[in-house]
Image (cartoon, helix red, strand yellow):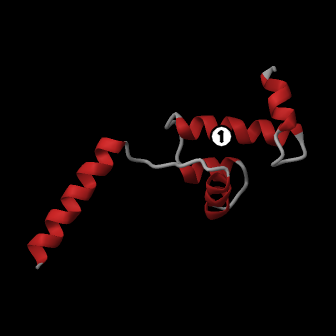
Amino acid sequence: MSINATIARFPLFRDYRRKEEFFTALGMLYSRQITLSKAAELLNMDKDDFSVILKSMNLEYSYLTEDEAEKELKTAKALIEMLK
């Protein structure tokens, strides 16, 4: 199946161009070329609405890599211990 056929069958938007814009923004987001806010802006959507769409599609997005998230968690736990 071609990419055009896949885009055409995508149920989120009726207009093919809108679907194409969505997939372009999604690709740029996941390749870390743009932020979640910028992707939503490009789609003329509210950031929270765009986030809900991603979650409803079971697409997880984080600005942090897994290693960065682990470091953040360790730092946060260390700070909590210092404040006790």
Of 13 and 11, nearer the camera is 11
* Side (left or right) of 9 relative to 42: right
Residue 41 spot, x, y in % from top left: 65, 52
* Side (left or right) of 61 relative to 74: right
* Side (left or right) of 80 relative to 82: right
The part of the image, by quadrant, that contains residue 82 is bottom left
Q: Which residue is mark 1?
A: 25
The part of the image, by quadrant, that contains residue 34 is top right
Q: Is residue 17 above or below residue 45?
A: above
Of 38 and 55, nearer the camera is 55
Taking the spot 19% from the left edge, 64% from the top edge, the residue there is 77
Taking the spot 52% from the left edge, 33% from the top edge, the residue there is 31
Q: Check disc 1 and give the amino acid type.
A: Ala
Taking the spot 57% from the left edge, 54% from the top edge, the residue there is 37
Taking the spot 16% from the left edge, 67% from the top edge, the residue there is 79
Q: Secondary structure at mark 1?
A: helix
**Which quadrant is the C terminus positioned in?**
bottom left
Residue 83 spot, x, y in % from top left: 12, 77
Q: Is residue 12 above or below residue 6?
A: below
Give the residue furthest to the top.
2
The part of the image, by quadrant, that contains residue 30 is top right
Residue 75 spot, x, y in % from top left: 19, 58
* Side (left or right) of 52 relative to 22: left
Residue 68 spot, x, y in % from top left: 30, 46
